[in-house]
Image (spheres, rainbow, N blue to C red):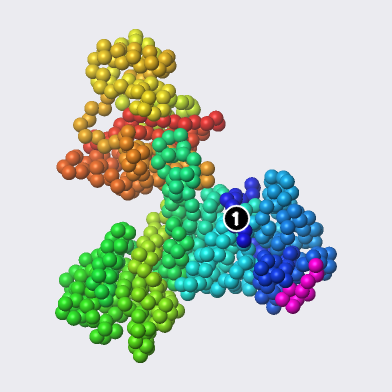
Amino acid sequence: MTDGPTGEPAEGTELSTSSGLDALWDPDVVTVVGASADPSKWGWFLARGALRGADRRTVHLVNQRGADVEGVATVRTLDEIDGPLGLVVLSVPAAAVPDVVDEALARGATGFLGITAGVDRAVGRVGAERELAARIRAAGARIIGPNCLGMVDMDTELHLAWGEFHPGPIGVISQSGQLGSEIAGLAAHRGLGVSRFVSVGNQVDVSAAEALGALADHSQTRVAILYAESFGEGADFIDAVRRMRAAGKQTIVLTVGASGASRAAAASHTGSMTSGTDVVDAACRVAGAWRVDTPTQAVDLAVLLSHAPLPAGPRVGIVADSGGQGAVAADVADAAGLDVVEFDADRRAEIARMLPADAGVGNPIDLAGGGEQDMTTYARVVQACLQDADVDAVLLSGYFGSYSVDTPSQADREIGVVESLAAAVAASGKPVLVHSMCPDSPSLTRARELGLPVFPSVEAAIGALTGAVRIGRDVREVPEPSVPGEPVAVGSGYLAARALLQSLGVPFPEAAEVHSIDDVRAATRRLHGPWVLKADWIEHKTEHAAVVVGLRDEESAVAAFAEMHGRLGPGAYVLEELDQRPSPVEVIAGVRRDPTFGAVVMVGAGGTEAELWRDTVLELAPVSVDTARAMIRRLVSYPLLAGWRGRPAADVDALARTVSALSQVTGIPGHDEVEVNPLRVDQDGVLAVDALVVSHEV
């Protein structure tokens, strides 16, 4: 099988509306070039799939030997076909692809599906695939692929892919065809199918973002799973997800790039302390999508999003028929950041009246055999939880679902409880998730039919609920940078960084540029001591002994300068007033330009151990003061800023204003990476005491 490598949409490709791709999703004619009578060949799967839609469209099969396929006659060449070719499927040797494309374009082909891989290599010319794409676009047609597994649209009876697909509500867009096929298979195993499957392969024309955006107008699709190894123009991805949300549909993102080896580190800590998935997560927050780590997690979340209502918040009630399973569920939920709410006395009393005397009526609720005595107890207790204004979702965990298998005579009774649960969901508008020891039982098959999401493990259920709680919450617009005052010239070194950031409102201590001992003496008379001496041009000063702290008199400053100048040589040095505040917290903040999603801003625990702790939060830039404040509160180290163990609380508002101001820096041409470390914050405000700018020619 082919498995599309990392690819980018062809240069100049614009994200179009779904109408621009209708000739691909629902063609009047399909022509399979390379149809085969051999069931082990790609051409056989493609021909057989095309013939499934023969009652809806004309199907032509091209086989150079003229062999019948599935009892259907073929032609040897395109010349033997009378009339239009429509969508042309390319399943021929790579060297033959350009000629087939040109011949089909001359015949008015409306689209292409490129299965074949390795066209550039076969013709001996890098860029041959993109040249084909350019000719196709110039002729008014489009191409998916090449090097893809194919596409399927259940609504239009289009099946042009390797393998079997089952109908359902999930749209799957995948840069890797085989991984997309795995997702479709996992969904089928969970009782869900796909509405549309698109393997975009090398993306020489139709991009993953464009295929995703087209699902917004696809009536059969309720939720999309996108697997992407690259995102092309990040703005197109964000636009596609927002179009999905406008249509009432959610997008689940699966990608790669979490490991340090998967991306090149940037010049500053700002780059080296974050991963590629940090940026994707930030883009997902702006767009309103949610990123998962594995295909299984993607399908778990799709199970919930495809049928159940979205929870309004993170507050969860847990009902279990085992104290142990309820406790485990509560721990997993708490670790995931969900709120296992405490029921008030009236709610506990109401639940207690339904259960045995030794039942647990807090949260989690332990039915203590109440469900075995009267199976309707499950539905009545869950309904009581749903009626609580402080509950956003309910998890039912444990044995329920097993009665119809272990005691078949109780199957109808258990199905009746399932129907009551579904009615309670409909009445409350809140989701109920079922984690069962027997998730494939007849009663839980009925649950799926009624839109109740069923999970084989508590971690799968909690993972899905966590994603559903967070997806699309607090989606924000990223404004254009607004840089105040006159533009600051591009420069390198600490002094240039100070000038740039001060123009944006970032505060620094008073300082003087010094080149000689006389300069140092003059500076000590003007600046308040003690002082810090720095070599202006060295980026990471501590590692190179290019900074001396605590110079308390003129002679110590002169001696430090003489030693450093003798060791490092001539250049600009900086004498700066030392921040003497008693209890500042050191923070790192920076901005860099991501090649896909543009400017991103980071804030984290700073100082010389910043890379050790790697406690960072990242968003697409620029950010408002409110967004910056929310970023700061997400830090693991935030309690240090809030006043840890009696220390005075730092001025978080001043820090938020500084981070917001810093996030504007990429609005100044030529400044691609800027970092302040440390940014010292205490109750009296913020002072930046070191900064780095990585600039490129404008």
Q: Secondary structure at mark 1?
A: loop
Between 65 and 256, which is closer to the camera in this rendering?
65
Residue at 35%, 75% in the rendered image: 437
Q: Is residue 428 above or below residue 643?
A: below
Instruction: Return the x and y of residue 334 as percentages of the image width and height.
Output: 28, 60
Residue at 39%, 82% in the rendered image: 443
Q: Which residue is mark 1?
A: 4
Q: Is residue 630 magenta?
A: no
Considering the image in quadrants, where does the C terminus appear?
top right
Residue at 24%, 15% in the rendered image: 553
Is residue 293 at all visible to an observer of this figure?
A: yes
Instruction: Return the x and y of residue 77 as percentages of the image width and height.
Output: 81, 64
Between 656 and 453, which is closer to the camera in this rendering?
453
Q: Tell me the amino acid under the disc marked 1.
A: Gly
Considering the image in quadrants, where does the N terminus appear?
bottom right
Q: Is residue 72 magenta?
A: yes
